[in-house]
């Protein structure tokens, strides 16, 4: 009797130990993350661009995957609306807020209010001191890589048309500053002044007419070597303008990796020189994982970088395909 | 039987028929109007019951705060519609009001960032707003251009000037006045909410409590009669456009305080401003725009967005519902006008 008791206790203890170690192992993996019973507020300035939409979807899908409830708010590119949505969101007291892009100058006082209300704040692609974690691409790398690719393609000299309409957007600031920094080593590469302004909406049309005008102003071949933009929607208009003007010596450079632009870079005849392709859907998901970790009491770093890939004329066929497949899977062209 | 009567006494029965038709229309309009108000009330009741936190004081003050900018703009639009007549195609309308606000905000933020103080910057913003209003007045009253077209042209002028000034960038701004507007509060109500309350009171008193307001309605409702009575129609109509410009300037200061900057894209507000001014007419028995009606519809639009968010309904619905309501109200007003016309 006592013997069997002992045996039972032993077996139980062993079983318990085994269960504990199993739990310890799985606790270390991301699979165990849970947002059950949690409400996560998500605020995006807009979703009219491929990157924005994919990140916004990534966030929502991941929150649902982890069993949480999403309050998803798309401000339709209107600052007023985003501020109103954030204000109401604060009153709703969600367990965490994930904020995606927008004008930092406008947002910062409101992000501060989120923290003042005791709500953990996470951001996607938005570097602000108020966020616990910002999940993004390594924009310092991206900015330098795309600039170096451009300089290399230009043979280290020539004039560049630069779109600089969104310097107030943090990621654009980093990429632009990196471009400038790279160019300090290549004094023969010059930015044409005044710089061009990219706009939202009508980004493509506006970029098309801006670049067409500049090419008309500098009609001799070789007077313009490249067009740079901190994202890739102006690059679409710029590429079309260069091709329409028959100025194939001009190459265009941008960042994000919209499927349309990746296809252009893959096309050997297109003037799209290179694009730094990010993984917005993964970025969105990762920000949710960070929020879930934080809510589970784990430590979270101030920023998380999700890898990006520089797609240029040489590697486009191989490197571009996975991105196009991912876009197709998500049902976005 | 009645057919023969109709034939024999054609003139009399025509009159009778018209009277019956008009009474029917009026009755129909009444039904539709009450229906619209009932729909508003039903939506609110639904929010009160099902949207968590909807009726909390904190939330309601938030909505008033969120409605301040739209409200001030909608008053300007309402004044223009009162003075110019509420015919949607030929009556008074100021399509430039939102773009004008953008321009004033740009002027205000730019001057502040250049180091000019609040006093000068506010003055300049108001001067610019009223100048744009005067330009509208010149085009509509002086040149006799249809308000719809005249103010559409001025919209483009204002938007173009804003772009030229800001290069389509965000212009950050801070000043003592903005500080008060952002964080000030009195009796537990924030400064921005107070701004709407005070501005509403002033507008309601001017338009509904003075003989000036009465004359404004006379000018808009029956310009011929007003002229016969010795009122200067051009003066009153011009005044409404300049007032609308003034409202745009006031709204611009509120907007800069809320966004800590002047940002591109103010023109987006136009649809909501028009919606507020037009929706407000259902709160009046004669389907004329009133300041009180405008206030109610501004708050309704604010509560709509707020309630949807609290219910976790996609924000995409708000635009759709707003559009549907405009359609409904325009339908009702043309219906009511039909009855007035046959009267």
Image (cartoon, helix red, strand yellow):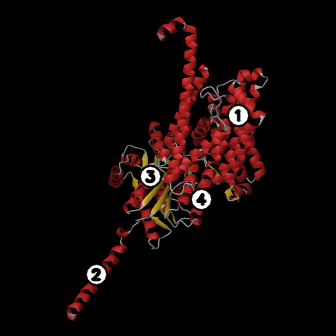
Q: Name the residue under label 4.
A: A110
Instruction: Report the chain holding disc 4.
Output: A
Q: Which residue lies furthest to the front in this view?
A: B1
Which of discs 1 and 3 lies nearer the camera? The answer is: 1
User: At numbered mark 3, what does the secondary structure look like: helix, strand or loop?
Assistant: helix
- The structure residue drawn at horizontal position 38% and vertical position 63%, both measured from the top left corner, is A66
In the displayed structure, B132 sits above or below B168; it is above
The residue most toward the top is B8
**Residue on which disc 2 sits:** A18
User: Whole-percent x and y of residue A39?
Assistant: 46, 62
Residue A169 pos. (x, y %): 55, 55
Q: Quadrant of residue A13?
A: bottom left
Check the residue under mark 1 and report the chain it is in.
B
Label 2 close to label 1 by CB (< 8 Å): no
Q: Closest to the observer: B242 or A172?
A: B242
| Residue marked by disc 3 | A51
User: What is the CA distance from the residue labelled 3 to the residue labelled 4?
Assistant: 24 Å
Q: Name the residue under label 1.
A: B241
Circle 4 SS class: helix
Q: Which residue is drawn at 55% across and 31% down?
A: B332
Task: Tell me, yes or no, whether the two marked residues, 4 and 2, touch with CB atoms within 8 Å.
Answer: no
Q: Which chain carries label 3?
A: A
Q: Which of A119 and B201 is in front in this view?
A: B201
Task: Give the crowd class for mark 3: few <14, some 14-19, many >=20 residues within 10 Å.
Answer: many
Q: Could you say whether the residue bearing mark 1 is in a helix, strand or loop?
A: helix
């Amino acid at each position: 009797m006592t013997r069997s008791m002992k045996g039972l206790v032993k077996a139980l203890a062993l079983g318990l130990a085994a269960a504990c170690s199993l739990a310890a192992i799985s606790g270390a993996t991301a699979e165990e993350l849970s947002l059950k019973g949690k409400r996560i507020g998500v605020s995006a300035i807009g979703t009219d661009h491929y990157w924005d939409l994919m990140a916004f979807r990534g966030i929502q899908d991941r929150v649902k995957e982890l069993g949480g409830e999403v309050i998803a708010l798309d401000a339709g590119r209107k600052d007023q609306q985003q501020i109103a949505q954030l204000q109401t969101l604060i009153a709703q007291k969600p367990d965490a807020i994930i904020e995606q892009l927008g004008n930092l100058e406008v947002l910062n006082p409101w992000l501060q209010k989120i923290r003042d209300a005791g709500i953990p704040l996470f951001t996607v692609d938005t570097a602000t001191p108020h966020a616990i974690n910002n999940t993004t691409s390594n924009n310092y790398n991206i900015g330098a890589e795309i600039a170096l690719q451009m300089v290399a393609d230009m043979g280290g000299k020539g004039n560049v048309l630069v779109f600089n309409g969104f310097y107030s957007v943090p990621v654009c600031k980093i990429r632009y500053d990196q471009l400038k920094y790279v160019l300090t080593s290549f004094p023969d590469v010059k930015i044409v002044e005044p710089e061009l302004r990219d706009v939202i909406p009508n980004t493509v049309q506006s970029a098309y007419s801006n670049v067409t005008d500049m090419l008309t102003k500098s009609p001799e071949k070789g007077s313009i070597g490249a067009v740079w933009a901190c994202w890739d929607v102006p690059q679409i208009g710029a590429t079309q303008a260069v091709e329409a003007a028959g100025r194939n010596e001009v190459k265009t450079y941008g960042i994000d990796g919209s499927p349309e632009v990746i296809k252009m870079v893959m096309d050997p005849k297109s003037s799209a020189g290179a694009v730094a392709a990010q993984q917005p859907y993964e970025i969105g998901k990762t920000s949710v994982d960070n929020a879930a970790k934080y809510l589970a009491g784990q430590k979270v770093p101030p920023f998380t970088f999700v890898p990006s890939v520089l797609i240029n004329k040489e590697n486009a066929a191989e490197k571009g395909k996975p991105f196009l497949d991912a876009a197709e899977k998500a049902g976005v062209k | 039987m009645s057919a023969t009567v109709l034939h024999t006494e054609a003139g009399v029965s025509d009159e009778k028929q018209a009277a019956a038709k008009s009474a029917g229309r009026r009755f129909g309009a009444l039904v539709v109007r009450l229906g619209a108000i009932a729909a508003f009330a039903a939506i609110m009741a639904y929010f009160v019951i099902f949207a968590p936190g909807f009726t909390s004081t904190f939330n309601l003050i938030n909505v008033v705060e969120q409605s301040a900018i739209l409200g001030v703009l909608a008053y300007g639009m309402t004044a223009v519609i009162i003075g110019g007549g509420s015919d949607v195609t030929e009556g008074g309308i100021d399509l430039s009001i939102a773009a004008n606000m953008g321009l004033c905000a740009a002027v205000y933020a730019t001057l502040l960032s250049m180091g000019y103080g609040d006093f000068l910057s506010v003055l300049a913003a108001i001067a610019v707003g009223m100048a744009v209003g005067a330009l509208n007045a010149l085009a509509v009253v002086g040149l006799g251009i249809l308000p719809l077209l005249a103010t559409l042209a001025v919209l483009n002028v204002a938007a173009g000037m804003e772009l030229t000034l800001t290069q389509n960038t965000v212009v950050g701004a801070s000043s003592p006045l903005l500080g008060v507007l952002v964080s000030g509060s009195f009796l537990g109500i924030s400064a921005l909410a107070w701004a709407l309350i005070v501005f509403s009171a002033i507008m309601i008193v001017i338009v509904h409590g003075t003989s000036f307001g009465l004359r404004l309605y006379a000018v808009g409702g029956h310009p011929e009669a007003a002229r016969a009575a010795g009122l200067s129609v051009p003066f009153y109509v011009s005044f409404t456009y300049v007032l609308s410009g003034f409202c745009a300037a006031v709204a611009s200061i509120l907007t800069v305080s809320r966004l800590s900057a002047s940002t591109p894209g103010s023109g987006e507000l136009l649809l909501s401003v028009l919606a507020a001014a037009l929706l407000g007419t259902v709160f009046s028995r004669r389907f004329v725009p009133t300041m009180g009606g405008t206030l109610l519809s501004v708050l309704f639009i604010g509560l709509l967005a707020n309630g949807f968010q609290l219910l976790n309904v996609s924000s995409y619905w708000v635009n759709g519902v707003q559009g549907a309501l405009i359609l409904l109200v325009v339908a009702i007003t043309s219906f009511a006008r039909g009855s007035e016309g046959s009267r």
